[in-house]
Amino acid sequence: MFFSKFLPKNDVFFDLFNQHAGFVLKTAQGLKDLVDNYSDINSRNQNIATIDDSEHAADRVTKEVNRLVHKTFITPIDREQIHELINKMDDIADAIQDTAEVLILYNVNQVNIDILRLSDLSLKACERVKYAVSLLPDTGKANTAIAILKTCEEIDILESDSDRIMRSAMSSLFLDCQDVKELIKLKVIYELLETITDMCEDVANIIESIVLENS
């Protein structure tokens, strides 16, 4: 362990994390644009394509990270943390793509205020994930570590806000919706949207552990 401190570490992982976080953010922005302009068919198709392209790009980065982690002698952080972080980040992109697909496959005619609010929180959480990931190479600096932990706290708050809105939306749905098919559609969509922020919180928890172990 002592001598390993003097060996070069492969920091390409941080670059790949940052690339992946960028693609996750693109999927989240695509979802937000999708629901904001849902009545515009052309815009809808363009945003679906953006989400799909970004999710596929994120998949490619995930595969590269998982390939490199087995080939790299010295890694900048624990191998298990690398594996866990990249795959949990990829789960976010998958959840966003699933949400967009369900909106189309379920033939949702229009989105409501709860879908708009949940997609906005998803985007904000992904923005904070991207920022936290961008700071990871400098976790050894006290100010950077503090900034990352603060960002992770912000993600936790966004997840709590999303959970609160989802519960309120569900309550209204079961009280007011008389159309069973519509109820089922919206229930699934609310749950998927809330899952996005849940997964962002999972990533924040991993990042917190990385910071606390390496700062």
Image: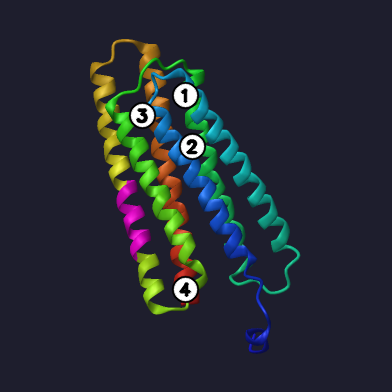
Local packing at callout 1 (Cα closer than 10 Å; few below 14, some 14-19, many 20+) is many
Q: Residue 49: percent from the left, percent from the top?
A: 56, 30
Q: Residue 192: percent from the left, percent from the top?
A: 44, 33
Residue that extends furthest to the right in the rendered view of this protein: 71
Q: What stretch is highlighted in magenta?
A: 150-159
Between residues 39 and 73, which one lies in front from this camera angle?
Answer: 39
The residue carrying mark 1 is 44
Amino acid type for the residue under numbered disc 1: Arg
Local packing at callout 2 (Cα closer than 10 Å; few below 14, some 14-19, many 20+) is many
Q: Distance between the residues labelled 3 and 4?
A: 36 Å
Q: Distance between the residues labelled 3 and 2?
A: 15 Å
Q: How far apart are marks 1 and 3 (CA)?
A: 9 Å
The answer to which of marks 1 and 3 sits earlier in the sequence is 3
Left or right: residue 20 versus residue 150 is: right
Q: Which mark is residue 102?
A: none
Q: Nearer the viewer, mark 1 or mark 4?
A: 1
Amino acid type for the residue under numbered disc 4: Thr
Left or right: residue 136 versus residue 59 is: left
The answer to which of marks 4 and 2 sits earlier in the sequence is 2
Local packing at callout 3 (Cα closer than 10 Å; few below 14, some 14-19, many 20+) is some
Amino acid type for the residue under numbered disc 3: Asp
The residue carrying mark 4 is 139
- Label 1: element kind: helix
The residue carrying mark 3 is 36
The residue carrying mark 2 is 96
Instruction: Name above or below for residue 3 compared with residue 131.
Output: below
